[in-house]
Image (cartoon, rainbow, N blue to C red):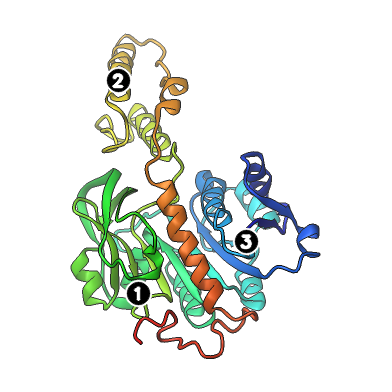
Amino acid sequence: MPLVANSKLPTFDRLKQEGENVLPGDVALHQDIRELHIGLLNMMPDAALAATERQFFRLVGESNQIAQFYMHPFTLKELKRSSEAEVYVGQYYESFDQIREQGLDALIVTGANVTQPDLALEPFWKPLNKVIDWAYDNVTSTLCSCLTTHAVLQFRYGKKRRHLGFKRWGVYSHSVVDRKHPLVSDVNTRFDVPHSRFNQIDREQFEAAGLHILVESDVAGVHLAASEDRFRIIFFQGHPEYDTVSLFKEYKREVNRFLKGERPDYPPFPENYFSLLTEAMLDEHHDMLLAARARGKPIPELPESIIVPALDNTWHDTAEAVINNWIGKVYQVTNNDRRKPFQDGVNPDDPLGLRR
């Protein structure tokens, strides 16, 4: 079913150009199709703000449930932004007050930039707690992405993430460990998920918090978990929303950081992402870059036009299937009045009926 372009947010035009099903808001008003209103708390830094919108909007829009999807992006005023980004947010985003007033059926919360040794010291800490607490009581299900998973495990369950001592960076194989949960219904039992993080919540911490582990990797750890009731809060530790080029853009950014002296070493390759041929090309570029810098010559550009077409995406179809299952369950258990998160007869402590 389509996304509804309920505002002039540029992301809708971009997705339409990419072939996504986007319905003009005035047309949607005249169709007798049930609406689902989904919030996106976008805490990503300015450079990734619009790309993150597109990634999550795309996953929701590709869901095949019988509903029209109204997306409601908002952010936290405590996050520092450039004047240009402030104008963008002011023009296209809603406020949390508006979100609370109108209500939501479901909520997605992105990650954020971290600058402090303890998440509780971050400027987003208290306002994020406020949003999560409100959503727990008023929204059928909240999906937490990566950093938000770490924050919620800390402030709701008292489980602090640990630093890995290195960056977990790449694409990793995962297995479904609870095949009965509706979120992984008809999903491949083994599939890939991208990760990009220095910190981790371990399996033992998820279990000690009483959470249900659904998907994990022998290398990258737990990726997908659910709250005690198996649905109110969904936790991602990886990044299934990533575009095919996301890790390459991150690699390119790290190369630029090396050139600026912001990191002492040349970045390693994201694991299990580039082909052997692409890695050979990037090794050659590395040698050329160092030689040019030593001679004071212009730095050669990365051969993007050759690399990007050779990148494989081995995770999007499964990410789409999981989001499809999530949206489907939200549709089934939420009330038509989205200010009341559960239908009559649905037990809010067991909305999926898994304890019968």
Residue 94 spot, x, y in % from top left: 65, 64
Q: Which residue is mark 3?
A: 71
Q: Earlier in the sequence, mark 2 or mark 1?
A: 1
User: Does residue 68 appear in this view?
Assistant: yes
Residue 264 falls in image quadrant: top left
Residue 227 falls in image quadrant: bottom left
**Which residue is at a point 22% across and 56% down the rendered structure image?**
163
**Which residue is at a point 45% across and 26% down the rendered structure image?**
309
Q: Which residue is mark 1?
A: 155
Residue with the most extreme bottom position: 345
**Which residue is at a point 35% across and 11% down the rendered structure image?**
296
Residue 95 falls in image quadrant: bottom right
- The circle on residue 286 is 2
Q: Amino acid at mark 1?
A: Phe
Q: Amino acid at mark 3?
A: Met
Q: Amino acid at mark 2?
A: His
- The circle on residue 178 is none
Residue 238 spot, x, y in % from top left: 34, 54
Q: Nearer the viewer, mark 3 or mark 2?
A: 3
Rendered view: 257 above or below 324: above
Rendered view: 139 above or below 260: below
- For the residue pair 144 and 226, the one nearer the viewer reads as 226
User: Does residue 77 appear in this view?
Assistant: no
In the rendered view of the protein, which quadrant contains the C terminus? bottom left
- For the residue pair 106 and 112, the one nearer the viewer reads as 106
Q: Earlier in the sequence, mark 3 or mark 1?
A: 3
- Left-right relation of 235 to 325: left
Q: How far separated are the C-alphas under marks 3 and 2?
A: 42 Å
